[in-house]
Structures are given as C-alpha cells and as structure tokens.
Amino acid sequence: MPLVSMNEFLPKAKENKFAVGQFNINNLEFVQAITDAGIETNSPLIFGVSEGALKYMGIEYTVAMAQAAAAKSGLPIALHLDHGSTFEVAMKCIRAGFSSVMFDGSHHSFEDNIRLTKEVVKAAHAMGVSVEGELGTIGGTEDDLTVDEEHATLAKPEEAIRFWEETGVDALAIAVGTAHGMYKGEPKIHFDIIEAVTSKIPVPVVLHGGSGVPDDAIQKAIAAGVGKINVNTENQVACTTTIREVLAKDANIYDPRKYLVPARDAIKATVLEKIRLFGSSNQA
Ligand code: 13P
C-alpha cells in the first residue's frame, strides 16, 4: 500500500472513539519496530518526523524507509512532518513524498497563525496531503526547542473553533496541559477544553506529549475527542535504556546488531502497549 493521508483513518477514529498513535521515527530500527507493532495489532500508523529527525536521517532515506514499511505491511501509514515551522519545509516534505504535514504556527500571533496555516492547507489539500495545525503553546523539550511551563499557554476553545473554521485543518493540536518529554509530576490535562472544542468541530484533537501520561488520563482524553496521540520520548527511553544495559553487561560487544536488536524489541513492546491503550487495534 502507498503512504496515505491521515484522512484515511482520522474521521473513523473520531467517530468510533479511538486514537491513532503518531510514533516519531529516529532511524531504521524505529521504523521497523513501529511497523512490526502495527502488523501484530492490525493498526493504522502515523510516522512522525521532526525537523531535527529529518536533518539526521535525510529526507530521501526518511521517505524510502516509510514507503518500504507501508509496502511491506499493507497497513495505512501516514508519513507526517511534526511541528513544521515554515511553508517551505512543508512543501519540501510533500514534494519528497510525505503524505501529511503539521504546520506549527503557534509561536505567531493568532491571526498570523490562521493566515499561514491556511496557505499550507490550500497547497497540501490540492495534493491530497492532510494538515495538522497547532494552537496554544505546548511546554517541554523537543529537538533543540524548549518551552518552559511558565510560557506554555493553554488553548482557548472559542479560538480553537474559529481556527478550524478558517483553516480547515484535518487535525488540531491544542495545548491542554501535556508537554513534550518526561513529566516530573503528573500532567494536569484539561479535558473540558478538549470536549468544548471537539463537540464543535468535525476533526479530532491531537494530544502532543503522550509519553508518561497515565493510562486513565489517555482513556479520558480519547473519550473527550482526542483522535491522534503523539509519542516519542518513551520509545527513545526504551531504546537507549536497553542499549545501556546490554553494553554494561558485556564490554566486548562491537557488532551494533547485538544491542540494536534488543533495543528494537524494546521499542516494539512500548508501541504495542500504546496501540492497545489507544484502541486502534484492528482499525487498519
Ligand atoms: P513526547 O516526546 O513527550 O512523547 O511527545 C511527542 C510529541 O508530542 C511529538 O510532537
């Protein structure tokens, strides 16, 4: 199957109250692990690629790996730019074969965010590519960007509704209290904001910062109308902890496969848990 737009599965997710995981890819082992978990559960998948990861892997390798995963698995897989910062980077990804893009205009004024997101939507939709927008500022650290909790601002429901009406995005990330990276305490998620927005717009809300959110809070968020949940840090932790343990046990290892195979298994186990929790099994 070729890569697909998120519209292949997000409307169904919103209607049937499940969420599709966006699992960020960082290298080949992440792609293999996430795809294997998707095959085992028959789940749709979203490969998230941040601008930092894109720079690390190279755009040609990124698209080729995702296309290979979609062809091998037969699953509906969207290759999605995560937090795209400009119109240009979004277009570059679409030209290279991405089937979905996020334009994150949350650092601009509300009116500029609408104007810039609209431009991306117009171009992307003309090519059958889905678009995610963002409103409010999500705290935490992703790649080299850190937003401290003080500067993280929650989305206002009436603004989020107007943002959707004017831009026509296919999924809307709104700041509701989660943050990128691991949490020190328990995140306080504002389910009332999610519900106030999703009851008024036809597309699902996206929950960023899915790592470390307790299972019951995830389930409540899905019930409130979240249809896409982003997870990166937990998979990175699973990968790196495993590599550390394997190398600490045996100082004579030099073949990368000796630590990458268990690392890949650990990522797969984490993704399997998330897919089951999100309810996207057998929704491919
Ligand atoms: P975590 O790294 O906290 O899981 O967040 C991922 C994310 O939201 C990517 O956009």
Image (spheres, helix red, strand yellow):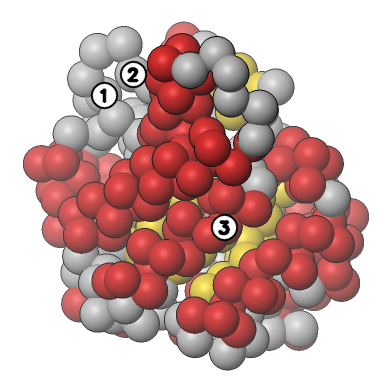
SS type, badge 3:
helix
Quadrant of image for the N terminus: bottom right
Q: Earlier in the sequence, mark 3 or mark 2?
A: 3
Which residue shows up at 68% across the image and 84% down it? 128
Q: Residues within 10 Å of mark 1 (few under 14, many from 20)?
A: some
Task: Report the residue that reaches farthest toward the bottom.
Answer: 1
Q: Is residue 16 left or right of residue 246?
A: left
**Amino acid type assigned to the residue bearing label 1 in the image:** Pro
Q: Disc 3 or disc 2, which is closer to the eye?
A: 3
Quadrant of image for the C terminus: bottom left
**Amino acid type assigned to the residue bearing label 2 in the image:** Tyr
SS type, badge 2:
loop
**Amino acid type assigned to the residue bearing label 3 in the image:** Val
Q: Is residue 78 left or right of residue 246?
A: right
Q: To which quarter of the image does residue 184 belong?
A: top left
Q: Which x, y percent locates residue 175?
A: 42, 37
Tell me how far mark 3 sits from mark 1, CA to CA.
28 Å
SS type, badge 1:
loop
Tag of residue 187: 1
Quick check: marks 1 and 2 in contact, CB under 8 Å? Answer: yes
Which residue shows up at 58% across the image and 18% down it? 252
Residue for badge 3: 31
> Which of these two is toward me, 273 or 33?
33
Q: Which x, y percent locates residue 57?
A: 78, 47
Q: Is the residue indicated by label 3 positioned so its CB lies within 8 Å of ligand 1?
A: no
Q: Disc 1 or disc 2, which is closer to the eye?
A: 2
Q: Earlier in the sequence, mark 3 or mark 1?
A: 3
Q: Image height check: is 111 above or below 227? A: above
Q: Disc 3 or disc 1, which is closer to the eye?
A: 3
Residue for badge 2: 183
Tell me how far mark 3 sits from mark 2, CA to CA.
25 Å
> Which of these two is toward me, 114 or 129?
129
